[in-house]
Image (cartoon, rainbow, N blue to C red):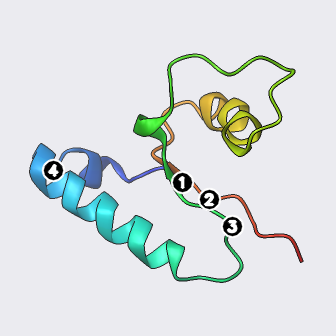
């Protein structure tokens, strides 16, 4: 998910409040497995041999140039 230009232009504290509210709302949805503020990810992706959830989420999140939040779907 990518915030609008207006949301990104908010002062840092208001933008953080907005992101926390967005993440909290998405976490309540059963169809979403996990919600990640992209800023919390490490700058580099884990190695290909890493099968952790972060390793599975990081490459697509890093590929989302300018993405703010990623929310992979829960298994059916």
Which numbered circle lies on residue 1? Answer: 1
Residue 40 drawn at (x, y percent): 43, 38
Dot 3 and dot 1 residues touching (CB under 8 Å): no
Residue 16 drawn at (x, y percent): 22, 53
Residue 72 drawn at (x, y percent): 70, 58
Q: Which residue is mark 4?
A: 10
Residue 24 vs residue 38: left or right? left
User: Where 25 sits versus 33, above or below?
Assistant: below
User: Where 50 sits versus 3, above or below?
Assistant: above
Residue 43 vs residue 19: left or right? right
In terms of depth relative to the viewer, which is nearer, 32 or 66? 32
Which numbered circle lies on residue 71? Answer: 2
As measured in the structure, the alpha-carbon distance from the residue carrying label 4 to the one carrying label 3 is 28 Å
Which numbered circle lies on residue 73? Answer: none
Viewer-side label of 2, 3: 3
Q: Between disc 3 and disc 1, whose residue precedes? A: 1
Viewer-side label of 4, 3: 3
As measured in the structure, the alpha-carbon distance from the residue carrying label 2 to the one carrying label 4 is 22 Å
Viewer-side label of 3, 1: 3
Quadrant of the rendering where the N terminus is positioned: bottom right
Which numbered circle lies on residue 33? Answer: 3
């Amino acid at each position: 998910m990518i915030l609008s230009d207006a949301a990104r232009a908010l002062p840092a504290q208001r933008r953080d409040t907005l992101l926390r509210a967005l993440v909290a709302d998405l976490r309540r949805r059963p169809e979403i497995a996990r919600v990640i503020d992209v800023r919390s990810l490490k700058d580099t992706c884990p190695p290909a041999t890493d099968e952790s959830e972060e390793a599975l989420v990081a490459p697509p999140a890093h590929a989302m140039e300018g993405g703010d939040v990623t929310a992979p779907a829960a298994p059916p």
